[in-house]
Image (tube, rainbow, N blue to C red):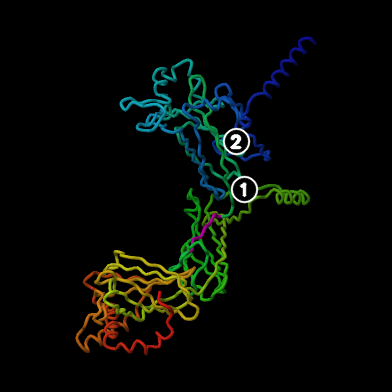
Amino acid sequence: MSHACRHLGLLLLAEAVLCAAATRFQDVLSQGSTSTVTSYRKLQGWSSDQNKWNEKLYPFWKEGDPRWKDCWKGGRVTVKLDTDSPALVGSNVTFVVTLQFPKCQKEDNHGNIVYERNCTQDFPVSQDQQVYVYNWTEWIDNCGWENCTSNHSHNVFPDGRPFPHYPGWRRRNFVYVFHTFGQYYQRTGRSSAMFSVNTANITLGKHVMAVSIYRRGHSSYVPIARASAIYVVTDKIPVSVSMFQKHDRNISDSIFIKDSPITFDVRIHDPSYYLNNSAISYKWNFGDGSGLFVASSPVVSHTYTLQGNFTPNLTVQAIIPVPCKPVTPTAPLPTSAVMAGAASNADNSTSVESMEDNPDEGCHIYRNGYYRSDISVVEGILEVNIVQMMSIQMRESQAENSLVDFVVTCQGSLPTDVCTVVSDPTCQVSKSVVCDPITITDECLLTIRRAFEEPGTYCINITLGDDTSQALTSALISVNGGSSSGKTEGVFIFLGVLAVLATIGAFVLYKRYKQYKPIERSTGQADNHEGLAAYFSNFKAIFFPSSTEKNPLLKSKAGIV
């Protein structure tokens, strides 16, 4: 009797040793990392990583194992694992796995791996015959795969579960095994795979998603690549804001112009459309003392009327409809037990969730998202005007080009550079662009000299800018060829007083309605208001040359640019 008991004990001990030595999913998929979480909430469709792993059918190689060098013909396969994290708790987080084969290899429509035609390789490839890296279709057809005795056991996952038999399942020659949160998920696929996980049972914070990929082999599956990615689950709505302002030269420097509206465009990161049926509000405090502004639209505008540094703050609130939880009556606990339970929950709490139960409208939970940014508001260049245009008389030996001076003023901050764009009369086709740095220390008044190689009608755009802003003005000008006759180029002689009165009226309208944008017109409109203003300036220069010296604007004008 004692002898039999001794044998039974040895058998039990041997079985225990074998069980302890069995490879588990955690051993294969943890990739050397050890989780500090001892208990997990089950993910739907996932299994515990304490299950046994069939290492005979799915061998496990550690990093540095020389067998990795021969796991794929023609080189190593790399894998890219992407995620649309961060994910709001309760929503889905999606992962996409993409296999990248060695050079000149690709997957064909049947799931086989072939060499690309007309691709540089170490050996020539016939243009009439397809060369395979792995012709899995031939393996399946020759064996009947499922009816082949030696391969029948291949159509199972590492835990022994059979492959799902949906249409085309035999053409999926890769096995993907994912691991996170103490659980694993396995599926077959081709050279890419995508799947989503609901985050309702995942704790808040950063987690690691690992994936191991195996390819089909003759006697077993062969590991070809492993990868991992960090994903984040949060109870705060992921929010980003883009800011835009007209005439802002650099939208990424957080410097804007006062008295000009700034557009705030709020974007909520919700790729799984978890918030589609939620009521969302946007609460703004722009930090300039203007008070709280609540909007239902993600796009708002705000104008800062003072210079300085400001901190706009945004709170996004979503009211999310959820199923109401059934009410389960429980017996009251003793006071000491209640206090102990409250303390324990306070220590273990990772998420604060506000829930409202309304019998008429159902149940809702509230989620908030927050955004803040520091911006600077400066004066900027607000307006640019051409106050005078003058043709420069040249000697006959120097009259290769026609020269025109443009006297320009601006409002706001002082510019540091000027750009001139000369285009055709429609202002559509650019002929030349000239930019120069300038230095202005007092008032914004400068003279810009530009050369015109050929006579004709031109559209000219003048832009003044500084580090943070820029403003533009446009005009039409007619230029004649250079000469020494003393006549000024760019002049059309109109009829008497009618021309003078029309020009004055056009100039008044121009000053009143001018905006900082290029004019757009057809060639036949070259005799409009701005053109008349330019012609009249030159007309005055011909018949009243002394008036140039009497103009107080020109007494203090800066050097010619």
Regarding mark 1 in the picture, which secondary structure is present there?
A: strand
Which is in the foreground here, disc 1 or disc 2? 1
Rendered position, 161 above or below 480:
above
Residue sitting at 44 percent across and 32 percent down? Answer: 190
- Most frequent secondary structure within the magenta stretch: strand
User: Which span is picked out in magenta?
Assistant: 237-243
Q: Which residue is mark 1?
A: 205
Q: Which residue is mark 2?
A: 183
User: Which residue occupies the foreground of this view, 234 or 546?
Assistant: 546
Question: For residue 147, which numbered disc appears in the image?
Answer: none
The C terminus - image quarter: bottom left
Spatial CA span between label 1 and label 2: 17 Å
**x and y percent of residue 433 in the render?**
36, 66
Rendered position, 440 above or below 295:
below
User: Which residue occupies the foreground of this view, 174 or 457?
Assistant: 457
Q: Is residue 37 left or right of residue 303?
A: right
Q: Is residue 242 left or right of residue 482?
A: right
Crowding near pointer 1: few (<14 within 10 Å), some, many (20+)? few
Residue sitting at 37 percent across and 79 percent down? Answer: 407
Crowding near pointer 2: few (<14 within 10 Å), some, many (20+)? many
User: Which residue occupies the foreground of this view, 427 or 23?
Assistant: 427
